[in-house]
Image (cartoon, rainbow, N blue to C red):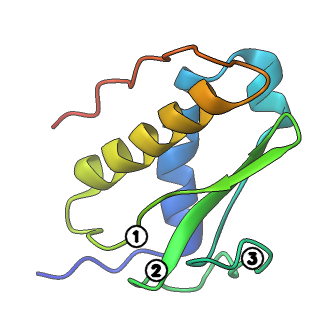
Amino acid sequence: MTVVMTVGELLAAFRPVAEQMLRPDEFRSARFWVGPYGDWELDQEQDDVVDGSMCVVWTIMGETQGARGLVEDVDDLPGLLHDLADDLQDFIAESSFAWGELRAIPSLGQ
């Protein structure tokens, strides 16, 4: 069975993961959205259905990055969230606000 997920539902599932990985001040500064892969400026509507052409994007402490991969397998939400957390972990470690820090990826029930 194919799972249909909206942009709002995906972001609602990802925010708690990001919150566990970020310090409180970092999370308060964070903005998350979903846009077409490679176009971080466009913000999909919350009720748009997620498809394989989209990626999750974040701005934290003034630095912006998109997930490396497309949002492809919403049927495996724990796996998708782990992949997003892995991308966020790399972003944090390469950021100016947390250079070199390896933040733990939370348990996602995989």
- Please determine whether, in this image, residue 104 is positioned above or below residue 68: above
Q: Nearer the viewer, residue 44 or 41?
A: 41
Which quadrant holds residue 16? Answer: top right
| Left or right side of 91 for 97 | right
Please name the amino acid that badge 1 sits on. Val
Considering the numbered disc 3 on the image, is that residue within a helix, a strand or a loop?
A: loop
| Left or right side of 5 for 107 | left
Cα–Cα span, label 2 and label 1: 7 Å
Which quadrant holds residue 32? Answer: bottom right
Cα–Cα span, label 1 and label 3: 14 Å
Cα–Cα span, label 3 and label 2: 12 Å
Q: Which of the two discs, 1 and 3, labels the residue nearer the N terminus?
A: 3
Q: Is residue 7 visible?
A: yes
Q: Is residue 31 visible?
A: no
What label sits on residue 50 in the rendered view?
Answer: 2
Please name the amino acid that badge 3 sits on. Asp
Q: Nearer the viewer, residue 89 or 44?
A: 89
Look at the numbered discs 2 and 1 and tell me whether their residues touch, using CB distance below 8 Å: yes
Please name the amino acid that badge 2 sits on. Val
**Place of residue 45 in the rendered image (x, y in percent of width and height, measured from the top left):** 70, 81
Residue at image position (63%, 31%) is 94
| Left or right side of 30 for 86 | left
The N terminus, quarter of image: bottom left
Q: Which residue is mark 1?
A: 71
**Place of residue 40 in the rendered image (x, y in percent of width and height, measured from the top left):** 72, 71
Considering the numbered disc 1 on the image, is that residue within a helix, a strand or a loop?
A: loop
What label sits on residue 43 in the rendered view?
Answer: 3
Q: Which of the two discs, 3 and 2, labels the residue nearer the N terminus?
A: 3
| Left or right side of 37 for 104 | left
Which quadrant holds residue 80? Answer: bottom left
